[in-house]
Image (spheres, rainbow, N blue to C red):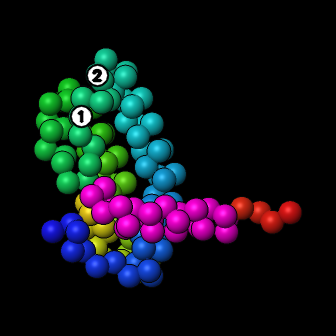
Amino acid sequence: WAQTLQVSPAEVMNYARSVLQMDSPRTQTYNQIKTLLTGANYDVNAIDMRCTATANLNQLPRRIRQQVRTLIVDYCNQASDIVRTNGLKVEQFNAITAAYPQDQTLAEQIRTALMQLQQQSQPQP
C-alpha cells in the first residue's frame, strides 16, 4: 500500500514545510514532558508520545498524568494546525509519514525539499 501512495511535488514541499515548522514546538513539548517525568523518576522513553497513542499515559503516576496528557494534546492540536496551514489534510500528512520509510523515492524527495527550505531560510550574506 505504501508504495502506491501518489504524492505531488507540492504535497512533498508542504509536508517538508510542516515538518520543519513542527520541530521547535515538538522539541519544547518533549523537554517539558521529560522534565515532568524525570522529576517523577520515570523514564521518558517508557511512554509512547505519539498523538494517536495517548492511552498508555494511564501508566504514569496520577500526579503528572494530566499534565503530560495536556502537553501532548496541545502539541498535537498545534501540529494539526501547522499541517492544515500548509495545505495538507492531517490524513495526508500521516499517510506520507507512514509511507516514506518504505518508499526510497519519496524519502529522497522529502530530504531534498527539507534541504531547499532550510537553505531558503538561511540569511543571505
- The answer to whether residue 120 is above or below residue 20 is below
**Compared to 75, does 56 lie above or below?**
above
Task: Give amino acid for label 1.
Answer: Ile
- x and y percent of residue 34 in the render? 39, 31
Picture quadrant where residue 121 is located: bottom right
Left or right of 45, for residue 118:
right
Q: Is residue 123 left or right of residue 108?
A: right
* Residue found farthest to the front: 104
Give coordinates of residue 40: x percent, y percent: 31, 21
Observer-nearest of 3 and 15: 3
The front one of 102 and 16 is: 102
The numbered mark at residue 24 is none
| Mark 1 vs 2: CB contact within 8 A | yes
Q: State the residue position of label 1.
A: 47
- Camera-nearest residue between 3 and 80: 3
Residue kind at label 2, given as amino acid type: Tyr
Taking the spot 28% from the left edge, 79% from the top edge, the residue there is 6
Out of 106 and 71, give the one closest to the viewer: 106
Q: Residue furthest right?
A: 125
Q: Secondary structure at mark 1?
A: loop
Nearer the observer: mark 1 or 2; the answer is 1
Please name the residue that numbered disc 2 is placed on.
42
* Image point (81%, 66%), residue name: 124
Q: In the structure shown, which secondary structural element does the residue marked by tag 2 occupy? A: loop
Is residue 114 found left or right of 78 in the rendered image? Answer: right
Work out how far the residue at label 1 is from the one at label 2, CA to CA, in angstroms. Answer: 9 Å
